Image (cartoon, helix red, strand yellow):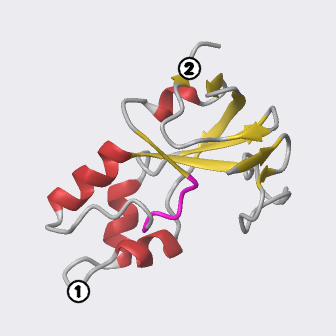
Amino acid sequence: MLVRAGAGIEGDRYYDTRDEPGQNITFIEAEEIEAFAAAHDQSADFSSAGRNIVTRGVRLNNLVGREFGIGNLRFRGVELCEPCLGFGEALASPSLAPAQVVRYWVHRAGLRANALTSGTLSVGAAFDSAA
């Protein structure tokens, strides 16, 4: 996927949108999706959370206010990407109301970040959390 500094991922619905801080790109931890699925007897669907990038082995909450890299690209963590009603509805089930989903995901739903450099982001690219 092609990432543009200050704009995000080309083709994304939020590309070049600046309505909210850190709207360029969003990240979520695979481990959090898997934990939610296991706790609620669901399958782990990484796309259902609606975040741009799924990471593994990275504590995203620690990256608020910090610069980090993925492959040859640089990002700055802006704020936690807290769950909204749409997020709750996407992960709800007959036995789990959207409001319950939102409560579960508070402080676990990912990270909003700004793209600092432009380039191609590839699946499996190395993550560098050094500032």
Position of residue 96 measured from the top left corner of the image (x, y, whole percent): 25, 77
Taking the image as shown, residue 68 lies to the left or right of residue 60, namely right
The amino acid beneath tag 1 is: Pro
Q: Which structural element holds mark 1?
A: loop
Q: CA distance from mark 2 to mark 1?
A: 39 Å
Chief secondary structure of the magenta portion: loop
Q: Quadrant of residue 115?
A: top right
Estimate how packed mark 1 is, as few (under 14), some (14 to 19) or many (20 or more) residues with alpha carbons within 10 Å.
few
Residue occupying the point 36% across, 46% down = 30
Q: Look at the image and say whether residue 124 sits in the magenta stretch.
A: no
130 versus 34 height, above or below: above
Residue 14 is labelled as: none
Residue occupying the point 49% across, 60% down = 83
Residue 94 is labelled as: 1
Estimate how packed mark 2 is, as few (under 14), some (14 to 19) or many (20 or more) residues with alpha carbons within 10 Å.
some
Q: Please, which residue is most extreme toward the top here? A: 130
Position of residue 62 measured from the top left corner of the image (x, y, whole percent): 50, 26
Residue occupying the point 52% across, 26% down = 126
Position of residue 131 measured from the top left corner of the image (x, y, whole percent): 65, 13
Which residue corresponds to mark 2? 128
Numbered disc in front, either 2 or 1: 2
Position of residue 50 measured from the top left corner of the image (x, y, whole percent): 52, 64
Q: Quadrant of residue 6?
A: top right
61 versus 107 height, above or below: above
Q: Which structural element holds mark 2?
A: strand
Closest to the observer, 110 or 124: 124
Residue occupying the point 34% across, 67% down = 101
- The segment highlighted magenta reads 48-52
